[in-house]
Image (spheres, rainbow, N blue to C red):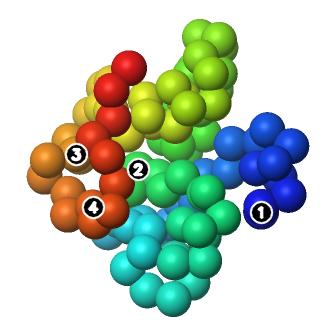
Amino acid sequence: LKIAKQKGALVVVTSQCASGSVILGSYAVNKELESAGVVAALDMTTEATCSKLAYLFGKGLSQEQTARALHQSLRGEITPMPSLAVSGTLRPRL
C-alpha cells in the first residue's frame, strides 16, 4: 500500500458490513493502514464509495482534495463528519 501511495494512487478502505464505519487507528490492522496513508471510506457502502470516487476523479481534483471530498456528504451517502467519532483526522475542507 505504501508503494501504491508513493506512485500517486489514492488507496481507500471500505467495509462490506451492512452497517458500521471504517475508522482508521481504531485497532491494530487499521493503525497499519493509517500509517500507510490509506483513506477510510467511513460509513459509505462499497458501491457509494466507488461511485463517489468516479465522480470526484472526473472533477480533476488533486489526490488530497479527492481524499478530503470523500468525507463530505454530497447526496446523503455518508454520515456528516461531526456525527462520527474519528480520532486523529482533520475535518475535510475543499
Q: Nearer the viewer, mark 3 or mark 2?
A: 3
Q: Are marks 4 and 3 in contact (CB under 8 Å)?
A: yes
Horizontal arrangement in the rendering, residue 38 relative to residue 15 (left or right): right
Q: Looking at the picture, which amino acid does disc 3 mark? A: Met
Q: Which of the two labelled residues, at mark 4 and mark 1, occupies the earlier sequence position?
A: 1
Residue type at mark 1 is Leu
Residue sitting at the far top: 59
Which of the marked residues, 3 or 2, is nearer the chain's N terminus?
2
> Is 58 situated left or right of 71 in this image?
right
Q: Which residue is mark 3?
A: 81
The residue shown at (62%, 22%) is 62
87 or 81, which is in the foreground?
A: 87
Residue wearing tag 2: 44
Quadrant of the frame with the C terminus = top left
Residue 42 horizontal side relative to residue 29, left or right: left
Numbered disc 1: secondary structure: loop
Q: Which residue is disc 1 drawn over? A: 1
Location of residue 33 in the rendering, given as x and y in whole percent from the top left corner: 60, 70
Please rate how many residues cluster around mark 4, counting C-alpha atoms within 10 Å: few if below 14, some from 14 to 19, many from 20: some
Residue 82 in picture, x, y percent from top left: 14, 47
Pick out the residue farthest to the bottom: 28
Asked where in the image residue 84 lies, by quadrant, the reply is bottom left
Sequence order check, earlier mark of 4 and 3? 3
Q: Is any atom of residue 42 visible in this view?
A: yes
Q: Of label 2 and label 4, which has the lower sequence position?
A: 2
Q: Residue at x 59, y 10 (%)?
A: 59
Figure quadrant of residue 50 = top right
Say which residue appears at 77% left-offset and 42% top-offset.
9
The residue where tag 4 is placed is 86
**39 in relation to 54, above or below:** below
Which of marks 2 and 1 precedes in the sequence? Answer: 1
Does the residue at mark 2 contact the one at mark 4 (Cβ under 8 Å)? no
